[in-house]
Image: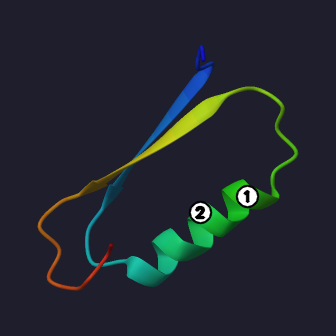
Amino acid sequence: MKLNYSFIIPVYNRPEEVKELLESFERLDFSDDYEIVIVEDGSQETSE
C-alpha cells in the first residue's frame, strides 16, 4: 500500500481531544490512502 499522506499528531495530556480527532478522521470521505501517527510526549494522563 502506497500512502499518499501522513498525519503526525503530537499529543500532551489531551486524551479526549485525540479521541474526537480520530473520530473525525473516520467520518471523512477521503479516498486516498493515509496514516495517522500519534506521538505521545510524556503525558501525565492516559492518552492511549
| Residue located 26% across and 69% down the image | 12
Q: Position of residue 46 (x, y in %)?
A: 26, 83
Is 39 placed left or right of 4 in the picture? left
Q: How many marks?
A: 2
Q: Which residue appears at 73% of the width and 58% of the height?
A: 26
Q: Determine crowd level at label 2: few under 14, some 14-19, many 20+ residues with C-alpha closer than 10 A.
A: few
In this rendering, the answer to whether 4 lies above or below 39 is: above
Amino acid tagged 2: Leu
Picture coordinates of residue 25, whole percent (x, y): 69, 55
Amino acid type, label 1: Glu
Residue 42 lies in quadrant: bottom left
Q: Residue furthest front?
A: 1
Q: Which residue is mark 1?
A: 26
| Image position of 24 (left or right of 10) | right
Assign a secondary structure to mark 2: helix
Q: Residue at x 59, y 63 (%)?
A: 22
User: Which quadrant is the N terminus positioned in?
Assistant: top right
Q: Residue at x 48, y 70 (%)?
A: 18
Distance CA(mark 1)–CA(mark 2): 6 Å
Q: Which residue is mark 2?
A: 22
Is there CB contact under 8 Å for labels 1 and 2? yes
Near mark 1 (Cα within 10 A), the count class, few <14, some 14-19 or many ≥20, is few
Indicate the quadrant containing the C terminus: top left, top right, bottom left or bottom right: bottom left
Residue 45: percent from left, percent from top = 22, 85
Q: Is residue 20 above or below residue 2?
A: below
